[in-house]
Amino acid sequence: MAPSTRRSTRASSGHVADGKQTTLSFKHKVTKPVHHVGKEEKAVSEYKPPARAKEYTPDEEPAKKRKKTEKEEEKLEDEVKEEVEDKKEEEDEVEAEEDKNVPVVKPQTPFGEAEARAAKLDDSDIAKYWKDIEASRRAKEVHKRNTEDLSTTEKVLRYFDVSSQYGPCVGITRIKRWQRAQRLGLNPPIEVLAVLLMEEAKGNSDIEQAHMDVLLNSTAVGSVGV
Amino acid sequence: MVTLDDVADKSLLQKPSPEAPESLERSESKYQPLATFALPKERNYHQQFADVYFIRLAKIKPIVEEIAHAAWEGTVVGGETATKVDRVLDVRQGQLCWVVGTVYMEMPLKPSVLEDISHDRWIAAPTTADKYYSPDGGDKIMLEDDSGRLTLVGSILKDYFLVTGCIIAVMGTENAHGEFEVLDLKFADLPPQPDRWRLSQAPKAKEEDVEMSDVSSGSRSKKIAIVSGLEFSGTDTSHAMELNLLLEFLLGEALGPAAQSELSQISRLIIAGNSIAKPSDTDAAGDKKPHSKKYGYDASSYNPLPAQLFDGFLAEILPTMPVTLLPGALDPANVSYPQQPIHPAMFPRARAYVSPPSTSSPSEPGWFDNVTNPWEGELEGWRVLGTGGQNLDDICRYIDNDDRLGMMEAMCRWRCSAPTAPDTLWSYPFQDDEPFTMKECPHLYFVGCQPEFGTKVIEGPQGQMVRLILVPSFAATKEVVLVDTETLDVSRVKITTS
C-alpha cells in the first residue's frame, strides 16, 4: 500500500485557494536527478517506462486475438514503438506457420480456446519465456541464492502474482485471476496458464493460491483470536 | 299523476342515462427487468475490495485513454508536446504528459476505520459528519492506479465534481513539490445508448386497427408513476392521510371521470425506496428490559405495524396496477450496496402477486416485482436505471454543493452509478465483474428519496439523451412523479389535505 501522504506545509495549497496559478515553466530547476539525453532529440522516443511485467506475446496466437493486440498496439506511444515492431514481425512470421496446422476442432468458450493453446506449450517454451524475462532485467540479481531452490514453475507464477496490472493477487486463486485478466482484455501471458494447467494436471494444489496470499492469511501457531 | 319526465329538468332528479358508463381499463405495461445487480445466493467475502477498483479501472481505462488521445495527442504547451504515460508513477518532473487513473479523495472528515479503532480505546463520541468536505481546504485529490498515488493540484479541479472512484485522464506536469499540476481533465462520458425496444417487443401498429376501442388508448400515451419515501410507520402519522389519498388517487377512486381517464394511463407504479420508516426509539420500548431473548432477539420489541400497513397498501393497489419495489436505506433488506430484493415473506397479502420461485430459467416477472437497488430494466422499451438514493446521497457528502442534478449528470459521464462504493458506501466485494460501471446508457435515470424534485435532460457526444429525475420523498413533500412513456416528459402530482 502506498505510504501515507506527506502533509507538507506548502505553498501549493495557496495556489488552489486564491485561484491564481503561476505560469507553468518547464525550464525551472529540476530538483530530482533525471537522466537527460538532450533536449534536441525527441525526449519522447528515448524515454522508456520502467519495465512492467513484459507482455510477452507467445509464438502461437490465433488470428483474431492478434488483431486485437494489433489494434491495442496502434494506440501505444512512440516510446514502445521498437518493441511493437519486433512483436509484429514475430507474429507475421508465425501467422504463416500457423495457417498450415490450425486444429480442425476449436473449443467454444474463450477459456477453452486459451486452454487449448496453453496445452500446446511444453517445458521448453516455459523455460524460454522465463529466460527472456530474466534477460530483460538490467540490474544484477541480488537474491539469487534465496531463489535457487525455486523451480522455474514457481518463479513464473510468482512473477505473475506481482504483476500488478492484472490486479491484486490476494484473495483470488491464480487461475481465476488469469481468467479475469483475460476477460478484461489485458492479455496475460499464455505461459502462465500453461504452467497452471500443468500443475493442476499433476494434482499439485499448492499453486492455487498466490504465495503472498498464503503468507498474509496464515496465522501464527498458538496464537489466540483477538 | 306527475311522471318523472314532466319534472325532468336539470335541477331536479334525472333518469339514469341509458348509456352505460365506459369502464376504463388501465393501460398495459411492457416490462422487462434485468438482473444486473442481483448477487448470487451463496456469496463469499474472502476477497478484498481492491478487486472492485481494479475491475472498474480495467473496464473504463481504455475508453478514457481513447478520448484523451483524441483530445491531447500532439498538443503543444510551452514548447513541449504531451505524451502518454502508462502508469501514474511514471510522470517525470518537467515533462508534459497525460495519464489515466482513479480519483481518490483524502478527506480528514471521512470515516476511517483506523481512527475508529484508535478511538475505541479512548471512548470518544463518534462524530458523524454530514459532509466529508472540509471547508478549510484540508482535502486532497489524488490519482491512483495499481502502481501508486499522485496528488493533483490545479485550479481547474474546482470546475469539476470529483469523488473517490471516478476514472479520469489528466494532462499536466509534475511540479517541484512532487504534485501533479493539472492543465486539463477528461472523463469517459456517456456510454453507448441502446435503441428503444432493444429487449422487449414493441407494440405492433396493427393492434390499433384490430380493436376500435383501443384506438383511443393507443393515441393517449402511457405514464409511469414513481414514488419514494412512503415511510409507513407505526408511530408517525403525519403523512398517513396523504398515503391514503395516494392510494385512492392511484386506484382512481378519488376523482371524477375526467381525471380517472387520465389516471388509467398510469401503467405501472415504481416505489423507489424507503417504504418502511425507521423505527423511532419509542417503538423499541427501550425502558422495559428485554424479557426473554428467544432466537437471539427480543420479540416483544419488534413492531410489525409498518410492514403490515405497507402490505395493506400494496394489496390494494396490486389488483389493478403492477408494482416494482426497490428497497431503500430504511427498508428491511441488506445494508450493503447493491441491496437485494425485499423478501416476499414481508408481505403476506401482496405475496400472492409475486411470480412463484422457479428453478428453471427466469420466468416472466410477476405483477409485483421485488427488485434490487440499484435496478436496471426496460420499461416501455426505454432502458431505465433507478436507485434508492444511497449513491447520490453519498456523493453529496463529498461535494460542497447542492446541485444534485449536476451530480447525477456527473455519474452518467463517469459511467459509474456508485463511484464511492466501496470507499464510503458499503458494498459487496465484487471480484469477477462490477455492475456499477454503466455499459449502456439508460434513457431514464431516477434516484429516489431525495429532499426535492428535480429533472433535467442531458446529452452525450454520440447523441445520447438521458432524462434525469430526482424523486422526492413522499413523507416530506407528498409528491408523486409521473413520467410520460412516449416523450419521457415529467410531471408531478402533489397530494394535500388542506
Image: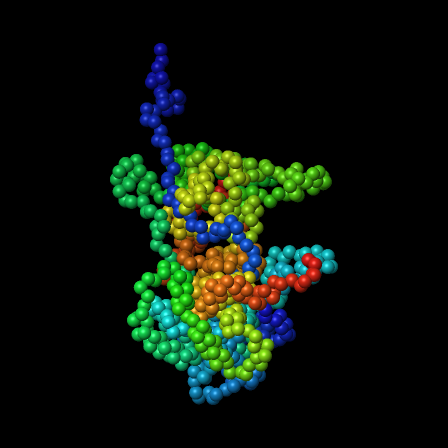
The residue located at (38%, 59%) in the rendering is: A109
Q: Is residue A6 visible?
A: yes
Q: Nearer the viewer, residue A47 or B308?
A: A47
Horizontal and vertical percent position of residue B398: 56, 60
Horizontal and vertical percent position of residue B426: 57, 55
Give the tally of numbered discs. Answer: 0
- Residue projecting furthest to the right: B122
Q: Position of A82 compared to B126: left or right? A: left
Quadrant for the N terminus of chain B, please.
top left
Q: Is residue B178 visible?
A: no
Horizontal and vertical percent position of residue B99: 48, 72
Q: Position of A12 compared to B351: left or right? A: right
The residue located at (44%, 82%) in the rendering is: A44
Q: Nearer the viewer, residue B35 or B212?
A: B35
Q: Quadrant of residue A68?
A: bottom left
- Residue projecting furthest to the top: B1
Q: Nearer the viewer, residue A10 or A221?
A: A221
- Residue projecting furthest to the front: A202
Horizontal and vertical percent position of residue B52: 52, 61
Q: Nearer the viewer, residue B316 or A143?
A: A143
The residue located at (68%, 60%) in the rendering is: B117
The residue located at (55%, 71%) in the rendering is: B148
The colour scheme applied to this rendered structure is rainbow
Q: Position of A63 compared to B111: left or right? A: left
